[in-house]
Image: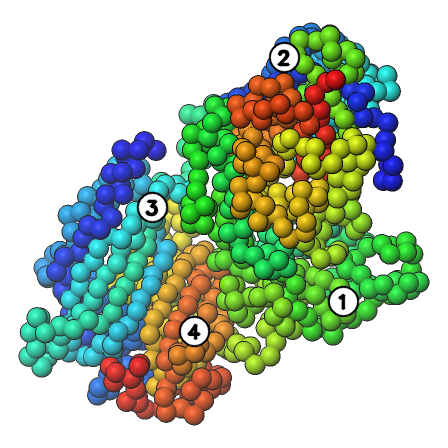
Amino acid sequence: MSLHRADSLGGRAAIAGIGATEFSKNSGRSELKLAVEAVHAALDDAGLRPQDVDGLVTFTMDTSPEITVAQAAGLGELGFFSRVHYGGGAACATVQQAAMAVATGVAEVVVCYRAFNERSVHRFGSGLAGRAPTAEGVAMGWTMPYGLLTPASWVALAAQRYLHSYGLTPDAFGPVAVADRRHAATNPAAYFYRRPITLAEHHASRWIVEPLRLLDCCQETDGGQALLVTSAERARDLRRPPAVIAAAAQGAGRAQEAMTSFYRDDLTGLPEMGVVARQLWRTSGLTPADIDTAVLYDHFTPFVLMQLEEFGFCGPGEAAAFAADGGLELGGRLPVNTHGGQLGEAYLHGMNGIAEAVRQLRGDSVNQIPGARNVLVTAGTGVPTSGLVLTSDG
Amino acid sequence: MEPDVERAFQEYAGQPAADGGRALDPVNLPMIRHWCEAMGDTDPAYSGPGAVAPPAMLQVWTMAGLGTGGGPAAGGSRSGAYDQLLARLDAAGCTSVVATDCEQRYLRPLRTGERVLFDAVIESVSAEKSTALGTGRFVTTRMDLRAYDEARGEKPEEATPAATHRFRILKYRPARSGDQRSQPPQDRPSQPRPRTPGPRPRPVINRDNAGFWEGVAAGELRFQRCDDCGTARFPWLPGCNSCGSAHWTARVAQGAGTVYSRVVVHHPLPAAFGRPYAVALVELAEGVRIVSNVVGVEPDEVRIGMPVRLSFERADEELTLPLFRPAGADAPQPLPELRVPVSRTLIVAGAIATRDFQDVHHDPELARAKGSPDVFMNILTTNGLVGRYVTDWAGPGAVIDGIAIRLGVPAYPGDELRFSGEARPDDSGQMTVSVIGRTDRGSHVTATVTLTPAATTPAATTPAATTPAATAPAAPPTADRTAPGSRS
């Protein structure tokens, strides 16, 4: 991609297979096994065999190396393997990596995967205790002695400034949680299946890091998700209708940090997502009005509001009203996270949201938006991030 | 936990914990004197004619005693429901108990010769919680205390309300490595991280930012200024984000700042902090921002836009940090530090003076058998020390209206307990004193004490901040302390 003009990736690759394990609180098996199961499930979905795969992409945070997944999944030689950094910000970028490899002929079939026992083994929310004195460690080290140790705490510090700037209260975040949980309530794969919440329950939930309440924070999940990417042309011959990658982009802002970008601008937006948004619109040729449904990364509710503003679905400071009017729900201006999001379905570092976008284009989501043709998906917020515009074929 | 088991525990809420309790002894000078000796409390109000009981001694009057037979037992008042609840918790494996919170409101002083009566209700039984000690349930009881002047021939029916007392215990299964044996192997790098008491996370220092921490050691908050474009920057980096220049000079901030954003951390709560705390993004007058804590003010009172002032503060033995305090007129008043060496004698004397005969407070062998490294201070002594710390500072005539404490790490023989505090007046003329007592292991106790300063003292809202011992013993008790109506 370029920061200034449309890139040539749009339309050349597609997601042809999706596959996941069950989403649970204790998988009872290794992260590697979860990864292999997810890869196999994506292959089955696409109607391909292990030996058809020649590329793998995952997150730097993943504990299952590409070579080990290949070894255990029955894959053969790999001509392309890559990992993307910055936690959940990597999600859509794994698909971008795969699409670039496919579009350039570097690889033919690339599987992107992410699998972890984030609930039963390594909980991100338990708090940092120390960091090595690398550049990354030092960046994090400016806040650690003062007790800013968890993702919730980093997000909360920006969220509080956002509320202050626009004269809002923490209740502004409630409609995001309510929409996610309402969508999860009808999704049998969701952890919070049949468990919707109300604004009053959001308001009554306990503080985690004020202004974030418990119900502003996503759940923690064990599970794996894989996405199979191949050329749009080849995808048309496979089992399922292709989800064409109309645009894919990464973004980092000026003076960007990973979760602790407190020292730049006015903290009311997500400049890195602005970089992603501009490129997605340029390359896809679409505008916010063209998007039928969106999967907006929702590890914490405030950044869903900021994303609506960065993508131009509404103006700065208007997202709270947008959400409060039911704008995020089925039948609203922009139905968001129809699978229930990471608050409602599962926290799979955003990869399960990409699968939901594919289901919307295939027409088989549990909360199907009738005739959905253009879907926006975003990756982790507060970190260098990425996004996708997926469209139905033809 | 199965729903019906959960419901069975919840159904204890609202049931009596103690019925018709009656103190074993009337309020009396010998017990008060022993208590004052143990706590080191020299307040003159607690001795001589017209003496009152130290407010922080409240729970002592309700204690059951040694219970070796012979005398009447106050503990006979404990309800069947409460005994049944404890037995049920024992049966669930939660055989260990530790007190975690104590919250007392004093409605009037207790005078010598008065007899204390009490009733208690089980306020709540929590869901199962994982704690550093082990998994268990918090049981909260609320006690209402009344008293009548037995010495003057009053009848029990004439008893008038004297205080309320909320008490929380944790009944738990001690965390032991053996508990994991029956479970299948997991990809778990280690056991679940216990909330071990410990110091704050350390700063992360390398060649790029060493100059900042050298500045902190020298009592300076240093930021960088680009030699080429003049842009001030923080955090420290080897190059300028505005122009890319590698040339810079360290500058010293003058210390004035404004809160740009703030959060209050509630969960998870690192042991080093002990209770919810405010983290702020402070914009310095020089135009750079830094993350720090705003201290000396309740966390929920830190506001965006609040003017603050830099203050270098010792977080623990090895770490000094640049923190911030509210600037301006509302700035709270610090209490002088009180250091209390925690000797074996203090622990045992405190336990006996508070009529707490739990073996973990006097018998090292039995304490070790229960997983503790040694005997440790009981909550009633901690409560007494907090009360003493505040009255030492507030001086004669001040009336303690309430003490609420929460325990953190235990205090063992050989520790040194260091109390610090901040007093803030409120609009009603009362003062709220935030107290924290630390040992090298971490925060032992956090407390909030509300008091009404002596009305006759000119500095009613600013008690004399002299050294504690200097004022207390010399002055006679004043009418305020003994007059029930003086609080209004």
Q: Which residue is mark 3?
A: B126
Q: Which residue is mark 1?
A: B287
Disc 1 or 4, which lies upstream in sequence?
1
A9 and A391: which is toward the camera = A391
Q: Quadrant of the rendered structure where residue A103 is?
A: top right
Residue B464 percent across, percent down from the top left: 47, 86
B63 and A131: which is toward the camera = A131
Residue A47 percent across, percent down from the top left: 66, 8
Disc 4 or 3, which lies upstream in sequence?
3
| Both marks 1 and 3 on one chain | yes
User: Considering only vertical position in the picture, is A253 above or below B294?
Assistant: above
B46 and B421: which is toward the camera = B421
Q: Which residue is mark 2?
A: A45
**Callout 4 touching callout 2 (CB < 8 Å):** no
Which quadrant holds the C terminus of chain A?
Answer: top right
Q: Disc 1 and disc 3: Cα gap in Å?
A: 47 Å
Image check: B202 left or right of B29? right
